[in-house]
């Protein structure tokens, strides 16, 4: 009978597993990782998600949830669309959905939740690792909480609405991505260049904990040279006592007891300090009491380390770890994955990245404008990796965006405070939406004196006029420049160490391990066989700068990311572009490796033999009749790389015979890459299926491709520098045969030609006609350029008001001081003075520090009724 029951249970379990698997599958993507195939609804991130405050009893809510997408303001859905695998973002392959979420839409999640049975009074906490961006949580139809912020963990006490038995949990998510005031890092709706695919919705673990009525809500751990100070936070600290014990290798070494909510100092005898060479961590046991009655307990850990700027024996300002000069040899890690986007496929994959970077000989990771799950920092703590942690970039220059940026920064510092691996906070990157830099840098220093503050990473010092260099790094601990490919050195300033916050960016293509085939790019590009030599040469120069006073450098980057192929490894984490032993040896001239190569770290060295060397033999095979589709595709792309365009066209035409609409993204990429003339067969494909191409490749990508080709073939030869009298009528006749794309590029080219050649009598009518029909296609910058030109060049009131309309259109994607400045001046010159003053006052509030004096002077002239032009 027992055997029969076990068999029935086993069969039921297998049936449930099969049903879950059939309801979900990873969606297709160009490349996967070795972990893609092991992900399933039964093992989606099973690890406890908060290693610095662990309770043994918890319920993981990852797995299959129902999902639906509605209009943003629609009512909750009556029925759900299908299943989504939590915690993978909606747009990812591992979610099982792989759909974009627009700012006009709302994403809904739903699942049932059974209330655990307990014998003692209990509170139930629903935890979210992160939801991007605005989350509203409902239990049994009642709102129980909400949160704004795409990168921060949050907790909702659901006790009051949690009923015995089954409960219905619903999470509604709105994510404006790159169209709102939300800090969003590198996420965009239309991936391109250094910006990547967005990650919407739940993207970190969701879990449930049952806790006592009075319980530990958080810990603040502050290390010093010889002690660890712990503040135990509780939901009701009145008359509660906290006890903290530090353990080394399981044995207690220090303890402290005192009031909850107050700092408790543990003096550690003969402390073992944390470093990349020896990432030693003390275990912590924390208990909460009321009148000696135990209430709650958690476990944690801490590392003892110090970080500071000090002078070395030569008088150079340097970065010192634990009182010792430590060069920060690092990489710029974006934290993106081909299968999970913001979410690594598994915890082992997350850990692999840090192990691989350390195995290459680096000791530092700059986590670039993304906050990772707590387990990533835990692995850095355990493995010994220094971390420079960026704040997630301010979305734009609006007051609303700035307020959100500051709010999230406070949450970020609190969320990540306890990790000893984090030695530096990075406030702004390359001046993106920078504001109040000195104030915010000083706020960071006051809030967290245990770390270095990099107030501004990325001044291009050698390429930009710097009136007062100190303005770039006021109150910062570092002077930081970026230089691609570099290297170079930041200026020396009292009390600041000199670092190279980004450099490198060398593209090396690895065939069959690319996200978008030949669409990939880099700051500079070298053939595979030359990369090791190029890298070693750059590193020799870096060593010279280190000897001159450089304290740290961040190479861009450890892994390729989507079309950005600047990685030392491929995006799928399979191929290392310089053999591991060789790159470690190169780095050893600057710092010794901090550990051996892990024997289980599986990496393949790139084949440094250039495959294009076989082109002649492959072309001969083609001529002898070898024409299978995969061969033709690779050979056509090879012909383009080697500039054999006649053969590339012939081979592509043969490959097209295998293609039938609707075309996949891979096929559209091939068509785009092989199409460079109106005579190419691909040109007609793009014209005929333009809407489908835009849907796959991105908004207006097909339009842009058509216009580029038409311009190169039909317009560019007519407006060359040798032709002083272009025949615009003939160009119009030749371009109109291509339909809307021909008309648009004709009008754009004509407008730009008159603008560039300062033919102002012809510019105004051309621009008016062009913008009147195609304003929606123009960027805010282009609209602003034409509008400000009208302000400076014309006095006609009607034209000034028309240009004011262009300026107003430029503001639709968000307010910017420069755009408001243009509109204010146009209205002022047109006689709408009070309206102009109001807008100029608004522009002044958003103006960067460098522009404020000019904006103030213009505003003063407006108020005095003086000309501003």
Image (cartoon, grey):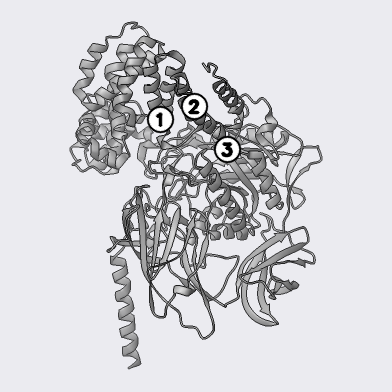
Q: Position of residue 458 (x, y in %)?
A: 59, 36
Kindly report which numbered mark, 3 or 1, lies closer to the viewer in this rendering: 1
Q: Which mark is residue 421?
A: none
- The residue to which callout 2 is attached is 834
Query: How many numbered markers are drawn?
Result: 3
- The residue to which callout 1 is attached is 808
Side (left or right) of 127 relative to 190: right
Disc with the residue nearer the chain's start (2 vs 3): 3
- In front: 305, or 98? 98
Side (left or right) of 665 relative to 495: left
**Looking at the image, which residue sits at the far bottom?**
1
Query: Helix, strand, or loop for circle 1?
Result: helix
| Residue at (65% x, 81% y) in the render | 294
Any part of residue 136 in sight? yes
Query: Helix, strand, or loop for circle 3?
Result: loop
Kindly report which numbered mark, 2 or 3, lies closer to the viewer in this rendering: 2
- In front: 573, or 218? 218
Q: Residues within 10 Å of mark 2 (few under 14, many from 20)?
A: some
| Residue at (36% x, 50% y) in the render | 101
Marks 2/1: CA–CA distance: 17 Å
């Amino acid at each position: 009978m027992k055997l029969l029951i076990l068999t029935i249970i086993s069969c039921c379990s297998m049936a449930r597993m099969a049903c879950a698997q059939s309801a979900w599958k990873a969606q297709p993507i160009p490349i996967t990782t070795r972990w893609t195939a092991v992900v399933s609804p039964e093992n989606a991130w099973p690890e406890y998600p908060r290693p610095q405050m662990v309770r043994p009893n918890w319920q993981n809510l990852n797995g299959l949830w129902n999902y639906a997408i509605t209009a943003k303001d629609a009512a909750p859905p009556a029925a759900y669309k299908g299943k989504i695998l939590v915690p993978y973002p909606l747009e990812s392959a591992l979610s099982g959905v792989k759909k974009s979420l627009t700012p006009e839409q709302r994403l809904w999640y739903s699942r049932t939740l059974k209330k655990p049975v307990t014998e003692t009074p209990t509170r139930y906490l629903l935890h979210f690792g992160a939801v991007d961006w605005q989350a509203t949580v409902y239990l049994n139809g009642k709102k129980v909480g909400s949160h704004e912020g795409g990168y921060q963990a949050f907790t909702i006490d659901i006790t009051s609405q949690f009923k015995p038995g089954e409960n219905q949990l619903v999470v509604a998510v709105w994510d404006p991505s790159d169209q709102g005031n939300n800090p969003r890092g590198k996420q965009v709706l239309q991936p391109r260049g250094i910006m990547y695919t967005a990650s919407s919705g739940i993207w970190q673990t969701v879990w449930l904990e049952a806790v006592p009525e009075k319980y530990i809500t958080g810990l603040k751990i502050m290390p010093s040279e010889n002690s660890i100070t712990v503040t135990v936070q509780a939901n009701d600290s009145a008359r509660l006592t906290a006890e903290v014990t530090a353990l080394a290798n399981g044995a207690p070494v220090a303890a402290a007891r005192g009031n909850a909510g107050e700092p408790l100092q543990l003096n550690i005898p003969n402390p073992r300090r944390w470093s990349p060479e020896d990432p030693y961590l003390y275990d912590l046991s924390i208990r909460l009491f009321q009148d000696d009655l135990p209430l709650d307990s958690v476990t944690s850990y801490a590392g003892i380390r110090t970080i500071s700027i000090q002078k070395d024996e030569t008088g150079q300002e340097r970065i010192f770890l634990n009182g010792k000069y430590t060069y920060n040899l690092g990489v710029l890690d974006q934290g993106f994955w081909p299968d999970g986007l913001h979410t690594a496929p598994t915890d082992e994959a997350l850990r692999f990245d840090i192990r691989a970077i350390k195995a290459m000989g680096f000791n530092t990771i700059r986590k670039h404008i993304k906050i990772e799950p707590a387990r990533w920092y835990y692995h850095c703590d355990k493995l010994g990796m220094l971390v420079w942690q960026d704040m997630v970039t301010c979305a734009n220059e609006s007051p609303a965006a700035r307020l959100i940026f500051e709010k999230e920064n406070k949450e970020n510092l609190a969320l990540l405070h306890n990790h000893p691996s984090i030695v530096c906070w990075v406030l702004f990157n390359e001046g993106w939406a920078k504001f109040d830099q000195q104030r915010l840098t000083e706020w960071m220093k006051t809030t967290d004196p245990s770390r270095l503050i990099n107030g501004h990473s990325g001044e291009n010092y050698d390429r930009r006029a710097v009136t007062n260099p100190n303005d770039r790094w006021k109150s910062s601990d570092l002077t930081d420049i970026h230089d691609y490919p570099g290297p170079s050195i930041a200026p020396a300033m009292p009390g600041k160490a000199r670092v190279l916050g980004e450099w490198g960016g060398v593209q090396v293509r690895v065939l069959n391990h690319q996200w978008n085939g030949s669409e990939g790019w880099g700051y500079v590009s070298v053939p595979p066989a030359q990369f090791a030599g190029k890298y070693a040469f750059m590193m020799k120069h870096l060593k010279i700068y280190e000897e001159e006073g450089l304290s740290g450098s961040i190479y861009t980057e450890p892994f390729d990311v989507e079309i950005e192929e600047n990685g030392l490894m491929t995006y799928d984490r399979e191929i290392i572009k310089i053999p591991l032993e060789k790159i470690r040896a190169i780095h050893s001239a600057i710092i010794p490796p901090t550990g051996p190569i892990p024997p289980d770290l599986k990496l393949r060295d790139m084949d440094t033999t250039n495959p294009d060397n076989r082109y002649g033999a492959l072309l001969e095979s083609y001529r002898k009749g070898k024409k299978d589709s995969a061969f033709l595709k690779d050979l056509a792309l090879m012909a383009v790389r080697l500039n054999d365009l006649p053969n590339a066209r012939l081979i592509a035409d043969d490959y097209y015979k295998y293609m039938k609409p609707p075309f996949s993204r891979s096929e559209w990429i091939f068509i785009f890459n092989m199409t460079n003339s109106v005579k190419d067969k691909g040109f007609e494909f793009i014209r005929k299926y333009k809407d489908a191409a835009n849907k796959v490749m991105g908004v207006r990508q097909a339009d842009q491709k058509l216009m580029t080709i038409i311009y190169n073939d039909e317009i560019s030869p007519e407006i060359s520098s040798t032709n002083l009298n272009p025949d615009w009528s003939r160009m119009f006749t030749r371009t109109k045969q291509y339909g809307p794309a021909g008309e648009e590029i004709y009008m754009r080219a004509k407008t730009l030609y008159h603008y560039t050649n300062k033919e102002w009598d012809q510019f105004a009518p051309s621009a008016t006609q062009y913008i009147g029909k195609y304003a929606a296609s123009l960027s805010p910058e282009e609209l602003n350029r034409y509008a400000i030109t009208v302000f400076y060049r014309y006095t006609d009131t009607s034209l000034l008001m028309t240009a004011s309309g262009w300026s107003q259109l430029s503001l639709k994607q968000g307010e910017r001081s420069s755009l408001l400045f243009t509109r204010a001046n146009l209205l002022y010159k047109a006689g709408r003075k009070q309206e102009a003053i109001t807008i100029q006052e608004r522009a002044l509030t958003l103006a960067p520090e460098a522009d404020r004096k000019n904006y103030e002077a213009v505003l003063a002239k407006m108020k005095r009724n003086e000309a501003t032009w």
